[in-house]
Structure formats: C-alpha cells, structure tokens
Amino acid sequence: MSKLRLTGDTSGYIEIQAPDAAGSNTLVLPTSNGSANQFLRNGSTAGTLQYSSMVEDSSSNVGIGTASVEANTNYSTLEITGKSGAGGGIIRLKTTDRTTAKTMLFCDTGGFEARVETNHPFVISTNNTERLRVLAGGGLTFNGDTAAANALDDYEEGSWTPEIAFGGDVVGQSYSGRVGRYTKIGRVVMFHCRLSFNNKGSSTGQATLRTLPFIPESTPSSNSGANLAYVNAGNVNFGAASRYVVDTGSTSIVLRYANGGGSTDMTQNDFNNSTDIIIYGQYATG
C-alpha cells in the first residue's frame, strides 16, 4: 500500500494513502485558489476537482449559489440563492423511488410556495399533533379530520348589484343608490344590501329582491330567510311582520308580510318612488 507523507516544519504530518484496490485513481486540482469558505467538488469529469457554488462560513452558515450567507445572529442558516433573472431557490423532497411522493419549497420573484407535486395532502402539525390539512383534492380540514365532506373549500368576499322586481319585471325603474356586499364561507353566503328608489317603475305583481350573488341550493326543504334592517317611505306592511324567503334554486328573495296565520306577497303597492330599504340574510349554496 503506497502512502505520501507531507511533514511540517516542526512536527506533525499529513498522509495521503492510495486505496488498497486494483486500478489507478487521479485527482486533478483546480488551477486557482477559489474563494474563502468555498467547497471542492468533482467536476463534470470524474477526478477533476472544481470549486462548487456552496460555501460554509466560520459560524456554520451554509450558502448555495451565493458567496456570502445572510445569517441571523445566534441562528445557523442555509441560504439557497437563484441563478439569474427571476429564478430562485428550491428545496425538493422525494420518496426513495423519486416518484411516489414529491414536495418542494421554493422562492422566486413571485413569492414563496410550499408545494405537494403528487396526489397527497399537505399537513401542518404542532406538538406532534395534526392541526391543519390541505386535502389532495382541495379544501381545509382541522385537528386530524380527513373527510372531504367536512373540508372548508371556499372563502370569498365581494359585491353585487341588487334590484327589486315586480311580477318579474323592472320596467321604468331607477335608483338613487344601490349596493350589495357578501361573504361566502364554504357553502354559506351572508349578504346585505341597500336600495333607494328614484322611481319604482310601472311593473306590477309579486315583489322580489333579485340577483343574489350565488344560486341557493335547490332542495325544497332548504329555504333560507332574510331580514329587514331598515325601511323609509314604505307601506305599513314593512316592519317586524315582514317575511323574506330565499327561493331555492334561483337568485331571488320573495318579499312577504304576515297576514293572520299565514303570509301575503308584497307587491308594487308596498313601495313608492322614494322607498329606501336595507335587507340582510344568509343562505346555503348547492
């Protein structure tokens, strides 16, 4: 077994030993000294050493793609910097076969993303207990629940433009103002709106509040309700006795008022050309 020993000026030495095996091995050193803290690696030709893009400074901070790690005091840092342009850094984790499960963390000029690239959930745990799960098919579940039926799959806020129709028509109507707002959490829509007539128009018949932001579920037993928050310049039938029913399978609310043991539809006669009304409520979508 062959050895090469390099001895210091006073004491101690470094010894390089050839492997105890047949064949020859050659290592070609780089032609420069590289940069401080820089690693050596095998180049594209085995045995030809090159300086890598990885560095480790004296504080145990490691950088890939950068010569200087941006570290925080008292923290050991791994920094991965993009190569050029809009590129960024990626950490990719895979199963042994490299295909069954694949995940990645990456950051570029578009922001940060944690991604599961295969048909698997993304789970967040604390104290060794699952707290939040993003299902592979979409939706959030909590505290170990994995059922898709229980997943929160939508949250949205927005506006809509309400209108009041008589007999399904809005002939000649005009408003001094109208606005609607909604919040949708899962299947539940919470809404409120305000309408102020300049002219109620010439249409006649059943009064409905139309153009709800989402279509309610169509099950006959799933009617929801709405409430009157405020009215000015309306008929006496408005008030605590008003009953507003969200139609199933449509985007309308039927406006009614209590009448003995039942209820009666409101019509154009319950409004005038300056009626100002605020309605709020909620319903479930299909």
Image (cartoon, rainbow, N blue to C red):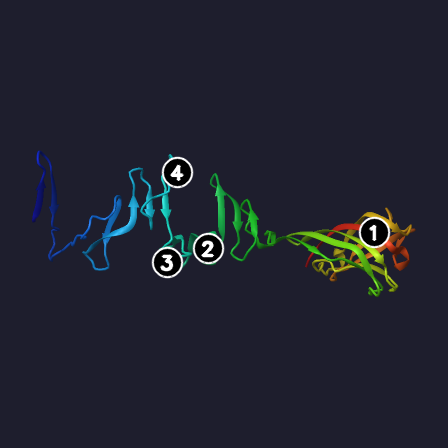
Front disc: 2 or 3? 2
Judging by the rendered image, the residue that carries numbered circle 1 is: 276
Judging by the rendered image, the residue that carries numbered circle 2 is: 116
248 relative to 102 in the view: left or right: right
Residue shown at 87%/52% (left/top)?
257
Judging by the rendered image, the residue that carries numbered circle 4 is: 72
Question: What SS does tag 2 mark?
Answer: strand
C-alpha separation, residue under disc 1 versus residue under disc 4: 60 Å
Q: Earlier in the sequence, mark 3 or mark 4?
A: 4
Instruction: Judge by depth and name the residue closer to the eye, 193 or 263.
Output: 193
Residue shown at 11%/36% (left/top)?
12
Instruction: Estimate how packed mark 4 is, as few (under 14), some (14 to 19) or many (20 or more) residues with alpha carbons within 10 Å.
Output: few
Callouts 3 and 1 close, C-beta under 8 Å: no
286 relative to 39 in the view: left or right: right
* Residue 98's disc number: 3
Image quarter of residue 255: bottom right
